[in-house]
Image (cartoon, rainbow, N blue to C red):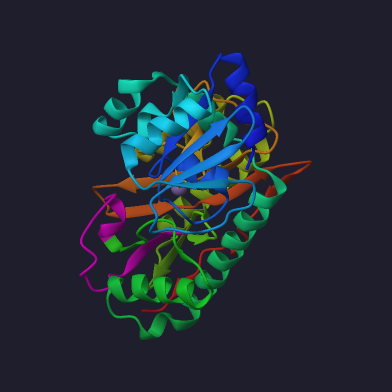
Amino acid sequence: MKTGEVRKILLKEKLDAVVLFNKSPGFKYFIAEDFDHGIMIITRKENLLFLSPLYGPRFKGFKVVQWKKFKDDWLKLMKDKRIRRVGYDAGSVLLRQKRFLSKYLKAKDVGALLSALRETKTPEEMARIRKACRITDEIFKGIVNNFKSFRKESDVARHIKMAALERGAEMAFEPITASGKNAVTAHHNKDSKINKGFMVLDFGAKYKGYCSDMTRTVYVGNPSRKEVEIYEKVLRAQLSCIDKARIGMNCGELFDHAVKCLGGDAKYFLHGLGHGFGIEIHEAPSSSPKSKDRIRKGSVITIEPGYYNQKTGIGIRIEDDIYFGKKKEVLTKSTKNLMIIRG
Ligand SMILES: [Mn+2]
């Protein structure tokens, strides 16, 4: 996708081609398929895939060049296509790949320019992201309906993974299913039985290479009035941030708004307010303190305020995915009313 935009970068940066190795996030992005083998070369005229003879795929918009002798055929290709100055993504390249590239060519890091292309989504990308969000909503419904059958936190995680596979999706990241005091820590061992108290369920389906990311916090047992109040406060902050977020807005300011909403409880809010996502689960823009990133037309971001109190063992996070198209749209639609599950 957007290889036309890459050609603008080539002209502007006076480059003959952009070269991407298979593990670069741009690789799957430009080919628009779940395929990550070989080397991608986007020249001013054409899109090439330099591939081992083991692979013989066809991709729309890409010409496959199979090598017999890797180095000789690479040098021949560069010579035939008159490629001397190339752009690459320094953030996703291995040292030996960088060495290989700059041994024969002049190489310049254009990683930031390439990831900026991914910041605004095309309609094709949005179709996949919407589907990933829809699957995530369905999985959440399944968790609530089947909750009685779960004993351990890992049972919930397994349910999430199976439900995603059944829907032709995979996990965007390892799901978080943290109950009771486990909800306060970012990472913990899921071998624990399900504790009473708040339970943070943070997961996302990945559909045709595109992520979603949602968090709901449910309550196992009987919440105290104080606990309900804290939940409501986090929810009000989340709703207010969604309401406030706009195209052109500075993401650092949006973070500050969350802090203002949480008031005295902001000291228990221990991470950024949100992040863009797409091919990767964390992409630009970032809504962390002092971020200079802006919400652009076509951005998708998460909005996810939280509350983590070590003393009381209360952990709460509420997260939705928001798309800024013609109008602002909340893509994840699972209920945010506090779900009380009598454990
Ligand atoms: Mn997130």
Is residue 245 something one can see in this rendering?
Answer: no
> Magenta region: which residues?
181-204
Q: Is residue 183 found inside the magenta-colored segment of the image? A: yes
User: Which residue of the protein is positioned furthest toward the right in this rendering?
Assistant: 326
Q: Nearer the viewer, residue 126 or 194?
A: 126
Residue 314 pos. (x, y %) = 33, 54
Residue 150 pos. (x, y %) = 34, 81
**Viewport quadrant of the C terminus:** bottom left
Residue 185 pos. (x, y %) = 26, 51
**Above or below: residue 65 compared with residue 130:** above
Q: Is residue 198 found inside the magenta-colored segment of the image? A: yes
Q: Residue at x 54, y 21 (%)?
A: 16
Is residue 180 something one can see in this rendering?
Answer: yes
User: Which residue of the protein is positioned furthest toward the bottom in this rendering?
Assistant: 149
Q: Residue at x 26, y 58 (%)?
A: 181
Q: Nearer the viewer, residue 135 or 269?
A: 135
- 153 with respect to 248 (left or right): left
Image quarter for residue 118? Answer: top right
Q: Residue at x 64, y 55 (%)?
A: 331
**Viewport quadrant of the N terminus:** top right
